[in-house]
Amino acid sequence: MRPIIFSKMDFSHSNIFGYIEDLPELTIIERPVRRSLKTPEEIERLTVDEELSDIERAIYLLSSGQDIQGTSVVANLPVLMRQNPAETLRRVLPKIREVLHVAGVEMQLTAAVSFLTVLQEESVSIHTYSHSFLHIILQNLEHRDAGVSNAWLETLLPVIEALPKETVRHEILNPLVSKAQLSPTLQSRLVSCKIMGKVANKFEAHIIKREILPLVKSLCQDVEYEVRTCMCRQLEHVARGIGTELTKTVVLPELVELARDEGSSVRLAAFETLVNLLDMFDADDRSQTVLPLVKSFCEKSFKADESILVSLSFHLGKLCNGLYGIFTPEQHLRFLEFYKKLSTLGLQQENGHNDNQLHLQTLEQEKKYISVRKNCAYNFPAMIVFVDPKNFHLELYSIFFCLCHDPEVSVRYTMAISFFEVAKLLNSDVYTIHKELVTLLQDESLEVLDALISHLPEILELMTNGRESNGSESKLLSIPDLIPALTTAEQRAATSLKWRTHEKLLQKYACLPHIISSDQIYYRFLHRMLTIILTNNVLPVQKAAARTLCVYLRYNRKQEQRHEVIQKLIEQLGQGKSYWNRLRFLDTCEFIMELFSKSFFCKYFFLPVLELTHDPVANVRMKLCCLLPKVKSTLKIPTDKHLLQQLELCIRKLLCQEKDKDVLTIVKRTVLELDRMEISVDAFQKRFYENDLLDQEKERREHLLLEMEQLEKEKQKNEGRSTNINDKMFEKKRRDSKTSSVLAKSINLSVPVSSSGTSAGKEEKKSKLVRSQSFSTQILHPKYSNIDKCPNKSSATGYTSSVSGMGKSCMLSFSDDSFRTHSTGNSGSAAFPSSSSRNLFNSSDQKNNGNKEGQSRKMSM
């Protein structure tokens, strides 16, 4: 680094102020600082007597206070109505009515919000409200400021829904019809349009036809395009009120005329209203009137009227399914191609453009095209219904691929939201989109990931089930590259600042035991959850990781791995150096008590939890004391009597030795709660019946995991043993094949067959039958449905194991009746062998003995 030379810098007074004089914009600092403060006279005028009641203070401020004080009174009106409605209506509301005549915009807007709040809170009856508040709302409805007028209109529309029919007719409808003949202002006509749409649902069809429809037609033909647009959007509500017959004869012709209007906004409003009213038109109206209009809109959208393009893309799914019954095959194909064209709009240059038309798209065009593609992604499930899910791969998969890989985040975000709907529609063919699932999981935007993981468990379940229905045997083969994509998504969420997304992702990962194998979870996810608990600094993320880890531990199928995880939890969390880790250990124990049986918790975690009563940090002891009632609820008498004594001993030590006041207070409160608790016994009790049933089910599943692990070990052991036996038998066959013909001839001619030789031959024949038998099925209890089926072998590898506490047994079913008859003829005990491997050993030994006897006879001859 070069040394800083201060001799070249001039800090003289004249030089510094010379620089400031050259900056005229800095002269603002010359203004006096106290200019913004209140003078004593102003403070005096703002001071109010503290002894005044709320009602009197409100009246005083509205009468002689400043505008800001009057606005605060108006904003506080709902509170006054809750406290003293009678006095507020009698004294405060008339004063507000007077002030609003000359009030500014801020007070007007505040009053509109306060009046709506009073209606929503139902502080007074609707009759009282219409008598006291409705006239004030109608008076200010035609305010000269458009913003104020719209604010009062937004208050009036909910009031119309709550008011009785007669009140609406006399107070709102009749004045509205009479004013319409006096050619009011533009703002007044816009207000009339919105009121017409709201009151149309309040009256019968004949009243609407006589009093409302003439005014509606007049507003549809208004000279201002804003009025025509506004009234066109209200025609849907009018049509719902008058029914299908009047809609066909009155509303539909108006919509057709407005669809050809010179104003683009009017045409857009007419198109959207037509789409929303498709269910009210019959097949003739749809085919003869609506369909030609829609085709015209589609043709003009790319050529002359791009303003309708965004709206057309948004309503295209509803439009295609609404007109599905009247489409010809050619029209069906045309609309599908139109959707495909919209889905890639802006990504590639359209055909038919010459060199003069190739120009850079403006920013507005780019935004419009992005909105169109986003709407196409929104409508993708509807288009699957339109083309039939069976034709998805042929017709729509390429578009699905493009939308999932779109360069814009908003498009991919919309696809991630609709991914679950797409998966449900595809049903058994859902495996065809597994690559796009992996792509979205690895998306660079966390918004896309957050949208996708909302339904991640359901999507993965559909993927797995769809693959199994197509003949896949392994869960891991159902979604290639799933595990790397899941780990990448978690790492990206962990390194970001969006901890809520990380928390949500960890919560959803609890579904993985139903999707991938126990070993994959153990090596790729379980240790990662433990690392998050130990290193992450966000408490909700740590708790989510702790619960997911407990779920993984619950479904782990290897006792050695379970013991290793339990050991790490106790050593690294329960006995960790950081008090923060020890607090997380207590959180983990809560999840253990929720997910596992009482006996499991008592066996592994009860004593490590009690050890924290001696923790040097008061916060840990405090949290432990709050957890003790749950800990005690896991005990069963008399089985856990020694643990109960340990618990009582720890509580006594806390009462006697605790020095922290806060901890001691919680200990005393916990002692009272523990005294009131009743401990469940080993036998069922009525008051604990449901909890005991739930705990028994948890314990049964835990025993089942141990039994499954034992069965898998026996299965592997038997497979290895049978393989060795087959190798030895094959070698003996090869050696004996050279002398078999000579032996048979010599035995038949010269040697009398002894009883031992006969039995040996029968046993040899039986062993051959056993070796040639293929066991096709295994009869298992339904609870063993998750056990992997044993593959068929050339040698029988069966087992019979009695399941403790269940009274059930797993038995092999033999499909060959000849073998069963033959075995029964020899001996009754051979019909149901205790193990196939034992039969193999017996048969092989007898065969060896027979071979040795045959060789000795040959030598003697």
Image (cartoon, grey):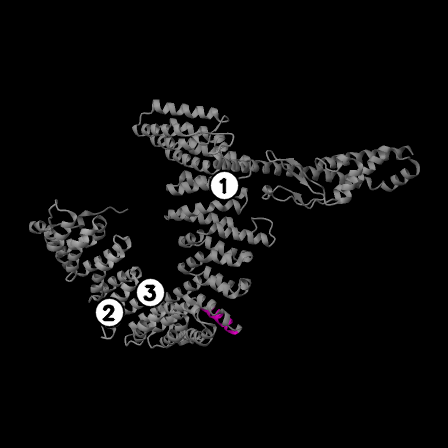
Calculate the distance from the C-alpha at mark 3 to the C-alpha at mark 1. 58 Å
Res. 838 mark: none
Q: Which percent across, then down, holds residue 270? A: 37, 72
Q: Which residue is mark 3?
A: 202
Depth check: give the residue in front, 281 or 18: 281
Q: Outermost residue toward the left?
A: 41
Mark 3 vs 1, N-terminal side: 3
Residue 435 placement, left or right of 277:
right
Q: Which residue is mark 2?
A: 175
Can residue 184 be seen here? The reply is yes
Type of amino acid at the residue the image marks with label 2:
Pro
* 159 is higher (above) or lower (below) than 513: below
Q: Are marks 2 and 3 in contact (CB under 8 Å)?
A: no
Mark 2 vs 3, N-terminal side: 2
Can residue 479 be seen here? The reply is no
Res. 552 mark: 1
